[in-house]
Image (cartoon, helix red, strand yellow):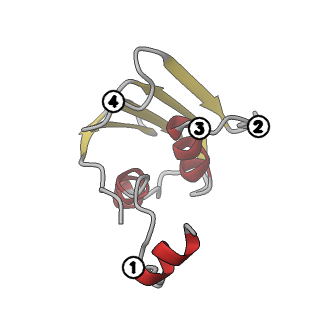
Amino acid sequence: MGQPINVVFTPSSKPGIFRFEVNRCLTGMDHERFRNDEEILGNTPSDELARRIFSLGGILGVHINSNMITVESDAVDLSTDELIETISDLYLFYTDGMEVPSDDEIVNSDS
């Protein structure tokens, strides 16, 4: 369940820089910057996305402004496809291998 985010990759002329445009506003009009040596304390969509991107390894920083995501990497073998999948799956709640609750389970949990 949930809705995947559409992601468009835009190559950068600088090695190790990956740019993505998505069909969701993640930060409003704010810029949010995350560094790999700083703890991410918040629970906003951009905080969660940064955590997931850092979990891929080889990431130095993530910058998110509205619907634009810039990832700085030190890994030459970082997979663009893996980054796109990580971004795209941000709002998916039930992925492969997860059991979706039945209508009866949902109704009974509300009572």
Question: Measuring 46% from the left and 80% from the top, which residue is drawn there?
Answer: 101
Occupied quadrant, residue 17: top left
Image coords of residue 44 (percent x, y): 56, 36
Q: Give the number of the disc on residue 103.
A: 1
Q: CA distance from mark 4 to mark 3?
A: 14 Å
Q: CA distance from mark 4 to mark 1?
A: 34 Å
Q: Give the number of the disc on residue 67.
A: 4
Q: Give the number of the disc on residue 39.
A: 2
Left/right of residue 89 with respect to residue 34 in the rendered view: left
**Which label's residue is closer to the chain start, 2 or 3?**
2
**Which label's residue is closer to the chain start, 2 or 4?**
2
Q: CA distance from mark 2 to mark 4?
A: 23 Å
Occupied quadrant, residue 24: top left
Callout 3: 10 Å neighbours few (<14), some, many (20+)? some
In front of the other: label 2 or label 1? 1
Can you identify the residue that label 3 sits on? 47
Callout 2: 10 Å neighbours few (<14), some, many (20+)? few
Left/right of residue 68 with respect to residue 23 in the rendered view: right
Image coords of residue 57 (percent x, y): 61, 55
Image coords of residue 54 (percent x, y): 60, 48
Image coords of residue 34 (percent x, y): 62, 30
Observer-nearest residue: 90 or 34?
A: 90
Occupied quadrant, residue 102: bottom left
Say whether marks 4 and 1 touch (CB < 8 Å): no
Amino acid type at image mark 1: Asp
Callout 1: 10 Å neighbours few (<14), some, many (20+)? few
